Amino acid sequence: MSATAIILARGGSKGLPGKNTAEVGGRACIAWTIDAATGAERVTRVCVSSDDERALSAARAAGVETVERPPELAGDSSRVDDAARHAFVQMGEPEGTAVILYANVPVRPDGLIDRAVVMLEESGCDSVQSYAPVGKHHPWWTARVDSGTGVVGPWEGDLLNHGVHRRQDLPRACVPDGGVIACTPDALMLRLGVAEGPHAFFGRDRRGVMTGEGEVIDIDSRVDQIVADAILRGRAGVPL
């Protein structure tokens, strides 16, 4: 089966303005995601949805389709699934898997998109999302610190750190890393009868593909941009 990739590239950003077209590794950030999408074996169509002419120009230069996103789908409170649905409809609601990619993720492991698409198709699930291990930022080590006294207490329960003090003794915990989302057209278009909400487009049967810690870099801050730039330049053998 074929897959259609929709790259979301909103022009605005509170954390890092212009992050989707900012230079990372010597190129516009979005260019790395376009490469990942066009290089995926299972992806046959690629589209960039954006309200930013710089992102749309980068897409046209790369030879992929574009959809101009209306202002009401490009604000700070706009939901990614609404933008993805708009682009999907504008493309004629193609058959096969719908893949959602974020333009501000310039670093993702090779083959990640195909792994998600294969899992979706072979399992018959509604959606597949990439997850990374949380590492040392584990929920068991989350605490409350009183703003007045500085007293430290457990986030939940009665025992601080759940009594675990070695990272290797923590149970496995994972967090969505932004690398890829693959879903069926019925899930994306909310045709499965799932209760309304920001995650309704994932459907009922949700699966995950794992990435290694640090294998996906989702740029939301200047620090993220610096890390991604160093990784990409390192891969290309460019001195920092």
Image (cartoon, grey):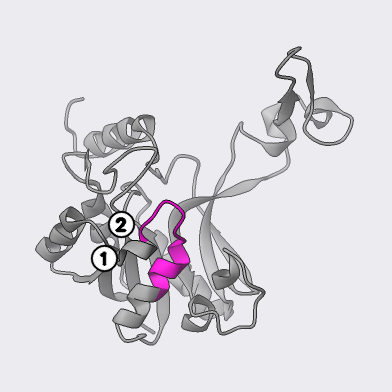
Is 145 located above or below residue 34 in the figure? above
Choose between 106 and 53: the one closer to the eye: 53
Look at label 1 and name its amino acid. Val
Q: Do the residues bearing badges 2 and 1 touch, measured as CB atoms within 8 Å?
A: yes
Residue 111's quadrant in the figure? bottom left
Residue 168's quadrant in the figure? top right
- The magenta stretch spans residue 175: no
Measuring from the top left, give residue 233's x and y in whole percent: 22, 35
Q: Residues within 10 Å of mark 1 (few under 14, many from 20)?
A: many
* Span of residues in magenta: 74-85
Measuring from the top left, give residue 160's x and y in whole percent: 82, 26
- The kind of secondary structure element at disc 2 is loop
Q: Of marks 2 and 1, which one's residue comes earlier in the chain?
A: 2
Look at label 2 and name its amino acid. Ala
Name which residue lies at 40% across and 45% down. Answer: 218
Q: Which residue is mark 1?
A: 48
Name which residue lies at 63% across and 72% down. Answer: 196
- Furthest residue to the front? 72
Choose between 53 and 214: the one closer to the eye: 53
Q: Which residue is mark 2?
A: 9
- The kind of secondary structure element at disc 1 is strand
- Furthest residue to the left? 61
